[in-house]
Amino acid sequence: MTLPDLALARELEAALAWWQAAGVDCDFADDATAWLAETPLAGAPAGAQRAAKAPGSGAGAAAVADAPRARIAAPPEPPRPLRRDLLGESPPADLAAFREWWMSAPGLDTARLFPRLPPRGNAGAALMVLVPQPEESDREALLEGPQGRLLANILAAMGLEERAVYVASALPCHTPIADLATLAAGGMDAVTLHHLALVAPQRLLVLGTALGTMLGAETAEGLREINHAGIKVPVMASETLEAMLHVPRLKARFWRRWMEWSATL
């Protein structure tokens, strides 16, 4: 009788123990196996559940793939910004008081690296132009750079004198990557609407479709009229001056829309 080779037996036993410790306790097959397949949902066909439990079974992987998968939960909504009463108990009663408040109110700081710039014009203007913010290069006056020169050319083509136009920005200073919707929800929309009520213009030109939130709407695209504080103002919205500078065809689009809009007033 031949005794087994104890050294070989120990080597086989050690090899099996190593593979078990590594978590490999199944044989291999030529068919692909969904080792990381999701567990079938409750209510899935019984055949699919059994097939999914059988390691090394290609049919099980196919059954799992065909079984209904759990819906991925939607990410939680970001917290809403804290809304503040920026105007306070005694809002500015006229444009002179508003300009002074606009330049000094501490709650309006959106970018401390850039200066605040006041609006310009008079109450009852034939046209109020609202832009998102001052230009990055503005230091002494609102829109004194390329955007301002473009606006001046537009107003000249419209046949409007500067004294007949009120030019304002929704933010007091240039704010890189400004989130207008968040700022509006934080209370700047009330400031913009109060500003509009003090100006009481005959028409409002909004240069920036994202400014709708500042005027109480989701977007400015569909905004045709604002009824606030007892005044009704016709509104036309278009792309920003910056966009027109970079995409010349937007200037032609703006002019066509202006002509059509003006003809209806």
Image (spheres, grey):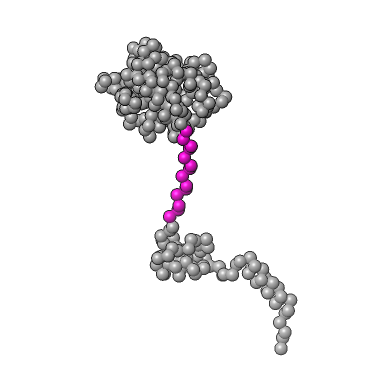
* Residue 79 belongs to magenta span: yes
Magenta-highlighted residues: 71-84
Apparent side of residue 141 relative to residue 94 in the rendered image (left or right) = right
* Image label count: 0
Image check: 112 left or right of 46? right
* Residue at horizontal 69 percent and vertical 72 percent from the top: 14
- Does the segment drawn in magenta span residue 188? no
Image-quadrant location for residue 198: top left
SS majority, magenta: loop
Residue 75, horizontal then vertical, whole percent: 47, 48
Residue 33, how many percent across, how many down? 51, 64
Q: Quadrant of the N terminus?
A: bottom right
Whether residue 240 appears in this view of the structure is no
Please, is residue 14 above or below residue 254 in the view? Answer: below
* Residue placed furthest toward the right: 7
The residue located at (46%, 44%) in the rendering is 77
Q: Nearer the viewer, residue 242 or 131?
A: 131
Please tell me which residue is depicted at 46% across the width and 35% down the height of the picture.
83
